[in-house]
Image (tube, rainbow, N blue to C red):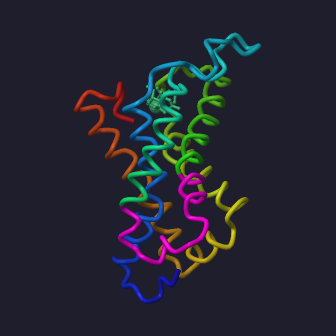
Amino acid sequence: MDLESYSILECIFVVLLIMSPAYLANTFAVLTGGKYPIDQGKLHNDGNRILGDGKTWSGLIGGTIGGMIVGYGLIILIHEFIWESSNILILFLLSFGALFGDMTASFYKRRRNLQRGDKFALLDMYDFIFMSLMLCFIFQRDWLLSWILDGWVPLFTILVLTPFLHRGVNIIGFKIGVKNEPW
Ligand code: CTP
Ligand code: MG
């Protein structure tokens, strides 16, 4: 991918599109979630739930697939991407990675005695993007490095705009009644 040929605004837009499976995975998890808790209601030895009722199979599967499909629909706007041979794997890593990160954060939150839905500002905002990028770094490093270090805009976009996007989408989800908290 060659981001040099884009203006800064276009570049921000392209980066948001590339990362859209990760952003959308969370949204779809909220919509499809709530059934079949992944920890099956079990407690950790600290007496708290392992993950809690906010992490379910229906959310994990629906979120991963929803993020992949709708993210792909958005990404085909940038033709370079669809000709990547391994793009389905990339879509999966971005989408599943987001929910895996979210799940890892929940595990950590439960160990800190925080209940389902309790706020943990920085962790809630970055957990999903961090794990998405981490999985891409492990399994699709050449692809990730082909755009993320192309100038300062990609990392800037991800680090600075992610909290706003995350918060914005959650407020909308809260207002329309699909999310229990606005964070
Ligand atoms: N969700 C789900 N399964 C997932 C992720 C999310 O079912 N793997 C659904 C749950 O209904 C959850 C909602 O999406 O309540 C919002 O997700 P999130 O804010 O991540 O969960 P919280 O309820 O805040 O729980 P936690 O404190 O563990 O983050
Ligand atoms: Mg939450």
As rendered, which of 1 and 105 lies closer to the eye?
Answer: 1
Pinpoint residue 30: horizontal percent, then vertical percent: 40, 32
Quarter of the picture containing the C terminus is top left
Q: Is residue 55 above or below residue 81?
A: above
Q: Is 150 one of the magenta-colored residues?
A: no
Q: Is residue 13 above or below residue 32?
A: below
Pinpoint residue 181: horizontal percent, then vertical percent: 36, 28
**Residue at coordinates 49% horizontally, 72% vertically from top-left?**
81
As rendered, which of 133 and 118 lies closer to the eye?
Answer: 133
Total labels: the figure holds 0
Q: Residue furthest right?
A: 45
Q: Is residue 116 above or below residue 92?
A: above
Q: Residue furthest left?
A: 176
Pinpoint residue 103: horizontal percent, then vertical percent: 60, 34
Pinpoint residue 113: horizontal percent, then vertical percent: 62, 19
The image quadrant that residue 75 belongs to is bottom left
Q: Residue furthest bottom?
A: 5
Q: Is 91 one of the magenta-colored residues?
A: yes
**Residue at coordinates 49% horizontally, 68% vertically from top-left?**
156
Which region is colored magenta?
74-94
Q: Is residue 139 above or below residue 100?
A: below
Per the picture, the main secondary structure of the magenta-coloured stretch is helix
Q: Is 65 left, or right, of 111 in this rendering?
A: left
**Residue at coordinates 48% horizontally, 70% vertically from top-left?**
82
**Residue at coordinates 69% horizontally, 10% vertically from top-left?**
47
